[in-house]
Amino acid sequence: MRVVLSLIILIMTSWVQPANAAPSLSQSLQNAQGENVTLEQYQGKVVYVDFWASWCGPCRKSFPWMNAMHAKYAAQGLVIVAINLDTDKALAEEFLTKLPAEFKIYFDPETKAAEAFDLQGMPSSYLFNKKGELVQNHVGFFEEYAAQYEQELVSLLKE
């Protein structure tokens, strides 16, 4: 029995994939002018990173919330960064004419940052503390959880 159990454990552990390294603020992105940038410039602040695309329905709901959070907490050290994944920048620009962003917009047309963050759905958000450590992430945006999302921001801003 012990041999069988050991064999089962050995087989099961061989199927486990190694975990990817935690996403970081060092991923290369493009600004609106097409220049390469990283989010490391925001270290020392609470950083809310949101991946979005023009075709994403829930993104239309998250943008007003992110604008409100930016207006409410930017002076306290919150930086909101929305990373667009559209391969055609014109689609993102059209989206932004309808839902303007008061926060930072960057682009990841080759989805390298998205791959590094191992996106599971759209939108996906990642919350980093002032030390640049990932402390929270969410897949999707649900208005019924907006107060919870805000509380996560507030608690990190108080640290």
Image: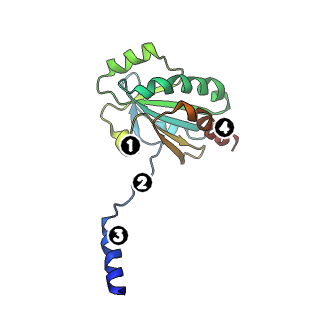
Q: Residue at x 45, y 23 (%)?
A: 60
Q: Residues within 10 Å of mark 1 (few under 14, many from 20)?
A: few
* Residue position marked by numbered label 3 in the rendering: 13
Residue located farthest toward the top when viewing the structure as drawn: 97
Mark 2 to mark 4: distance in Å?
26 Å
Disc number lying in front (2 or 4)? 4
Amino acid at the residue labelled 3: Thr
* Residue position marked by numbered label 4 in the rendering: 154
Q: Residues within 10 Å of mark 2 (few under 14, many from 20)?
A: few
Disc number lying in front (1 or 2)? 1
In the displayed structure, does residue 103 sit left or right of residue 96? right
Mark 4 to mark 1: distance in Å?
25 Å
Mark 3 to mark 4: distance in Å?
39 Å
Q: Does 130 sit above or below residue 31?
A: below
Amino acid at the residue labelled 4: Val
Q: Residue at x 35, y 69 (%)?
A: 13
Instruction: State yes or no: discs 3 and 4 in contact (Cβ < 8 Å).
Output: no
In the displayed structure, does residue 95 sit left or right of residue 149? left
Disc number lying in front (4 or 1)? 1
Of callouts 1 and 2, the N-terminal one: 2
Dot 4 falls on a residue whose secondary structure is helix
Q: Depth check: 35 or 7 in front?
A: 7
Question: Where does the image place residue 97, in percent across and percent down from the top left?
Answer: 43, 13
Dot 3 falls on a residue whose secondary structure is helix
Mark 1 to mark 2: distance in Å?
15 Å
Of callouts 4 and 1, the N-terminal one: 1
Q: Residue at x 60, y 43 (%)?
A: 130
* Residue position marked by numbered label 2 in the rendering: 21
Q: Does 111 sit above or below residue 98?
A: below
* Residue position marked by numbered label 1 in the rendering: 120
Q: Residue at x 55, y 37 (%)?
A: 47
